[in-house]
Amino acid sequence: MHAYHLQGRTLDSLRRVDLPEPAPGAGEVRIRTEAASINFRDYALATGAYQPELPRPFVPLSDGVGRIEALGAGVRGLAVGERVLGHYTTAWLDGGFRSDNHASKLGGPRDGWLARSIVLPATAVLPAPAFLSAAQAATLPVSGLTAWAALRKLDLAPGARLLVQGSGSVSLMALQLAVARGLRVIATSGDPAKAQRLRALGASAVIDYRQRPDLGAAVRELSDGRGVDGIVDVVGGAGFVELLAAAADNAHIAIVGFLGGFEVAGNLIGPIMARQLNIHGVSVGSARDFAQFLAEVERHRIEPVVGEVYGFDDAPAAIASVAHQRALGKPVIVFD
C-alpha cells in the first residue's frame, strides 16, 4: 500500500513508500483511510520542534477517518464498511492519564493515518458522526477532543466567560462547544476576515491582538473589569504571563498547546497565588471521553471548520501549511 514515512527531523525527510498491506490481528480492525487532518503536533514532529524526540521512521498524522475493511478475530460491535474514527492515544481507554500512554499515540511513535490503510485495536475505534463529511470527521480525534477535555477541566456554568486564542482547530472547537453550552466567548485574532468568522460562529467579542498587545487590559474592558472565568491556552511561551492578567479571581486555565514554545519567563507564582488561579495541563482524553465528546457533537449538530483541502500526493504541502495558517480551520488530506 502507499504510505508516507517521516524518516528524519525535517519536512524533506517525509518520503512516500510502499508498505505491505497490514493484516489485523486478534482484537484489531483494518481501516481504509478516507481523510486525515493535520495538527500542529504533526508539523512539530516533521520539523524537529517536538519534545521529546521520537524514534524514526514512522507513518505520521494522528487524526483520521475511514471505513472498516477487515476485522480480526474476536472483534464484536463493529462491521465491515462502517465509517469510523481512531482514538489518538490508543491505550488510554478510561480513567486518569498515565505517562506510559504516550507510547500508544498515533502519528508517532505508533504509525498514523498517512497511509492507505491503518490497523488499530478495536477498543480504540469509534463510529464517526453520520451527519459529518469525511473531511469534517477527520478533524475530531485530537483537536476536537482536546477542546472538549479542556472545557471539562474548566467546568464553567452557562453565562460564564471564556477566552480562546486565535482560530486554530482547538480554539474553534472550544468556541463552538462553549457557545452550544451557553458560555460567553471572547476570542482573539489578528485577521479581520477571521474575526468576522469567529463572530459568526458565536464569539461575543473578538480582540485584535495586533492592535491590543495588552491582552489582560483588553479582556477586562470586555468583562466589566473582572476578567474571564476560563481560558483555553493554545500558545504557551512568553505570552503566558500576559494571559494570567486576563483571568478573573479563581479562574481556571487549561494549557493545551505550545505554539509560542515551552519556555515561560516572568512572574507566574505571584498572580497564581494572589488570585487563586487554577492551572490544568490537558493531553487530549480517553476513549470514553472521546465517545462522550462525539455524543455532544451529535446532540448539538456541531460541524467542525475545515480549512485547506489537499490530496494524498500533496501531503508534504499539507503539513507545511500549518506554518502559515492562511485559511480558517484545520488542513485536511482527502484520499482518493
Image (tube, rainbow, N blue to C red):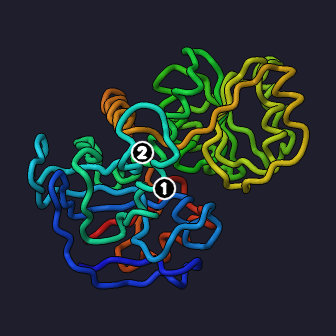
**Left or right position of 36 against 281:** left
Q: Which mark is residue 304?
A: 2
Whether 16 is drawn above or below 203: the answer is: below
Of the 4 image quadrants, the one containing the C terminus is bottom left
Three-letter amino acid code at the position of disc 2? Pro
Q: Determine contact: label 2, label 1, CB under 8 Å.
A: yes
At 52% from the left edge and 46% from the top edge, which residue is drawn?
99
Please provide percent x and percent y for residue 188. 69, 42
Mark 1 Cα shell of 10 Å, populated few (<14), some (14-19), many (≥20): many
Whether 181 is drawn above or below 245: the answer is: above
**What residue would you read off at disc 1?**
330
At 79% from the left edge and 53% from the top edge, which residue is drawn?
263
Q: Kindly state the secondary structure of the residue where label 2 is placed.
A: loop
**Left or right position of 272 against 321:** right
Three-letter amino acid code at the position of disc 1? Lys
At 77% from the left edge and 51% from the top edge, which residue is drawn?
237
Q: Quadrant of residue 199?
A: top right
Q: CA distance from mark 2 to mark 1?
A: 9 Å
Between 161 and 62, which is closer to the camera in this rendering?
62
At 42% from the left edge and 58% from the top edge, which residue is drawn?
62
Please provide percent x and percent y for residue 122. 22, 48
Whether 120 is drawn above or below 241: the answer is: below
Please provide percent x and percent y for residue 87. 35, 48
Q: Of the residues under marks 2 and 1, which one precedes in the sequence?
A: 2
